Image (cartoon, helix red, strand yellow):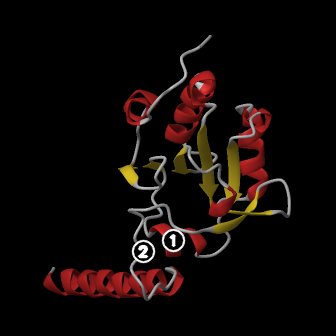
Amino acid sequence: MTEKMLKGGIIALLLFIISYGGYRLMKPSNPATPDPSTLPYFEMKETGSDQVFDSKSLDNGQETILFYYGPECSHCRTLADEVRSRMDMLKEVNLVYVTHIDPYKAEQFRKLYGFDKFSNVHFLHNDGSTFYNAFGDMFIPSAYIYGKDGKLKRFIRGETSIREILPLIENLKEPGA
């Protein structure tokens, strides 16, 4: 019995060491600690095209919500549905969706929720460590809400709802206003 436990412990330890080593190799290296307290500079390809989009392309003077999402994530889909239903209120807000998942799936997600009809919504593909180097956290789902001054108002790691985000946005346009 003790011999079986010892062998099991050794196997578990070896699996842990191998898994951790693989994780360290795959994790993007970043010698500087990212500081997303102000909207950092980033540059990524837009889904559905070869065009590069960078943070300087955002409409200055508008608030920005950056979503790190997965096209097949159920929480992300629920939030996208909520955002889409409030687009009349969010037309003066930069909405940026970033994923590292297959760009084709991201493009399908964009079209499914009708975001392709809005000029203030941008879908970007994080190819490599661009997002990590700028923001640090790559948790799906997450949201970064920035004020007009580019300062981080709130970082939400994990599931959220539009009801939690809307109070953070100044001067929302009510429907019909």
Mark 2 lies on a secondary structure that is loop
Count up the numbered dots.
Answer: 2
Residue 129 image point, x, y percent: 58, 76
Return the residue nearer the eye: 74 or 18: 74
Using residue 15 as the reference point, say whether residue 28 is left or right of it: right
The residue under the point 51% across, 67% down is: 40
**In the displayed structure, would residue 82 be above or below residue 19?**
above
Residue highlighted by disc 2: 34
Is disc 1 placed on a helix, strand or loop?
Answer: helix
> Which amino acid, by three-letter code, is at mark 1?
Ala
Could you say which is closer to the camera, residue 106 or residue 35? 35
Quarter of the rendering containing residue 42:
bottom right
Considering only vertical position in the picture, is 61 above or below 101?
A: above
Residue at the spot 54% in from the left edge and 17% down from the top edge: 174
- Residue at label 1? 134
Residue 99 in picture, x, y percent from top left: 62, 57
Pick out the residue farthest to the right: 49
As drawn, 88 above or below 12 = above
Q: Quadrant of the N terminus?
A: bottom left
Q: Residue at x 57, y 69 (%)?
A: 41
Residue 13 in the image: above or below residue 72:
below
Q: Earlier in the sequence, mark 2 or mark 1?
A: 2
Viewer-nearest residue: 101 or 81: 81
Q: CA distance from mark 2 to mark 1?
A: 6 Å
Q: Position of residue 32 (x, y in %)?
A: 42, 85
